[in-house]
Amino acid sequence: MSSTEKYVGDMPFREIADTFEKIELITSRTQMTLYLVNLFKKTPPEIIDRVVYILQGRLWPDWKGLPELGVGEKMLIKAIALATHSRESEVESLYKSLGDLGKAAESLKKKAEERAKKAVSILAFMPAKKELTVNHVYETLTRIALAQGEGSRDIKLKLLAGLLTDASPKEAKYIVRFVEGRLRVGIGDATIMDALAVVYGGGAHARPIIERAYNLRSDLGMIAKMVAEKGIEALKGIKPEVGIPIRPMLAERLSDPKEMLTKAGGKAYVEYKYDGERAQIHKKGDKIWIYSRRLENITHQYPDVVDYARRYIKADEAIVEGEIVVYDPDTGELRPFQELMHRKRKHDIHIAIKEYPVKVFLFDLLYVDGEDYTEKPLPERRAKLKEIIEETDVFQIAEYIETDNPEELEKFFLKAIEEGAEGVMVKALHRNAIYQAGVRGWLWIKYKRDYKSEMTDTVDLVVVGAFYGRGRRGGKFGALLMASYNPEKDVFETVCKVGSGFKDEDLEKLPEMLKPYMLERKHPRVVAKMEPDVWIMPALVAEIIGAELTLSPLHTCCLDVVKSGVGISIRFPRFIRWRPDKGPEDATTSQELLEMYKRQLKKIAVQ
Ligand code: ATP
């Protein structure tokens, strides 16, 4: 009998801990996939969802809006102390010297076990220890998260200490890291999907089917369970479901109107690109959900939008997309993105909605009354959208024209800018112009104002390291190492070190912002040549601008692509603002930077 057979519908948690340990030592994605394949083969289908969530470092998808674990560092230290019969000061000092609470827990567990063994040899009998199982760990962590209100701190502490008491040293290490939200093993969704395709789909050809299902349902655990229990065929028929967010379709970028129209197939819809927050609005009867670009449930932030949706969507069930923008009620003018951020920072939502009223500009329809619209071409989606919306001043369809003329496009673009938009979106309207959930493709092309000059075009980069400053900034962080995302390799590649553009208050806040993400070593998904003073886990995204794109031997973005030994970098980079609405995988890709670099070369050649 294999070690897992005695667990019906369950498996020892040790299997996951062992996999984490192996993966932590490697950087090759192929090898990582193989380890996951082995793990999934051992996993009973009933619990594959739980295993996938644990690999993702969460208990459920964020969009469910369920509580997080709510265990701070102090409580974690207390729990480790209780579980290992140590003093809290002992845990703290070990944490300081090892720089990792997971390792501190592992080491103290080992000591505790040795002590127990000695005691047992005196008593000459060893009580049989029950192994932790995946279900037990998952359910205990769930109970910790769901414990709310009065007395919940004690309940959380008791549950966590109990779990760590039963864990082996290695298991304790990963449970602690999971609770801290820093598994640091670097398994991305892409790798999990690769492994699922091999185990349940018979190979790489099943990968796009899994990816499409994930794009429509945004719940990798649920998709894994479905494919494990019902097979790959079941995934093919998957449709959007009201209440479950769809991963958003994204745009490529260009700066020449003629090229845009050619790429779009000659004729296109050209729409205002509003500078606000993307909202995917779901309606089922009276129930409304609003999801952000990152699929967070932001319904509670927009009671006004909930009210618009209830009143002005004339369908029982629908999923529509639009941009929420602050406007000036006195003039009707649109206000910049920053004002929306001010609104979000206000504590009293009822005051906020009065001070910063919003309008919604709708641009797509994905589902209506039982029918999946994601597979239909854009003109059909738009016609239906018009049909089911009662347009008002605060809830209207995005301003647009249909054109095949570059001059007309340019004119509309200037008008858009003048009216407070960021630029325009050029959208293909041919037969194959479907809604490509989760894909950045050429069916949508963005044209933003800043493309007009050298590099006033901003990029969104991920923080992967930090440097201490000098002079006035001595002792504090003075610069950040920034990276682009490479979706093919699922890694982050460095682009520049940015030290200017920060206001004093930005710098003041840096240590606190970076603290939860500091690492003792480079994150496995970061590719870098430069050594920062502190490595940072890829999580925070900032908008960066610079004078121009250059080639650099210090950076790894598109390394060896343009020229051997050099990558693409930004000259004189400047911090503009944080992009809390973006996750690390939403950053500008290395491929996009390469395209920008090529276009810059073309422009210089013309001049
Ligand atoms: P950016 O950083 O330029 O805002 P992004 O990376 O968030 O872009 P893109 O695909 O590059 O996403 O640009 C599309 C974004 O523009 C959408 O996510 C949406 O928030 C916004 N937007 C504003 N108006 C429109 C519109 N008419 N159609 C589609 N998206 C729009």
Image: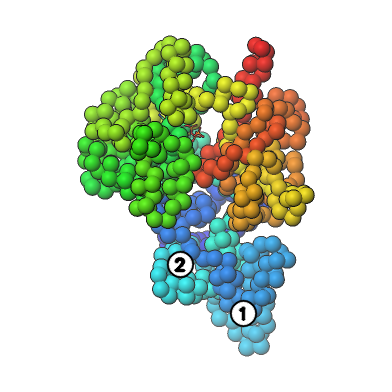
Q: Give the left or right position of residue 180, taking residue 365 as reference.
A: right
User: Is residue 548 depicted above or below 240 in this figure?
Assistant: above
Is disc 2 placed on a helix, strand or loop?
helix
* For marks 2 and 1 on the same chain, the one whose residue lies earlier in the sequence: 1
Residue 217: image location, x then y, percent: 39, 43
Residue at image position (45%, 34%) is 275
Q: Which residue is mark 1?
A: 85
Task: Tell me which corner region of the image, top left, top right, bottom left or bottom right, holds residue 592.
Answer: top right
Q: Is residue 524 visible?
A: no
Q: Nearer the viewer, residue 507 or 599?
A: 507
User: How many other residues sit within 10 Å of disc 2, few (<14), some (14-19) or many (≥20)?
Assistant: many
Residue 428: image location, x then y, percent: 41, 20
Q: CA distance from mark 2 to mark 1?
A: 21 Å
Q: Which residue is mark 2?
A: 144
- Amino acid under disc 1: His
Task: Tell me which corner region of the image, top left, top right, bottom left or bottom right, holds residue 550.
Answer: top right
Is disc 1 placed on a helix, strand or loop?
loop
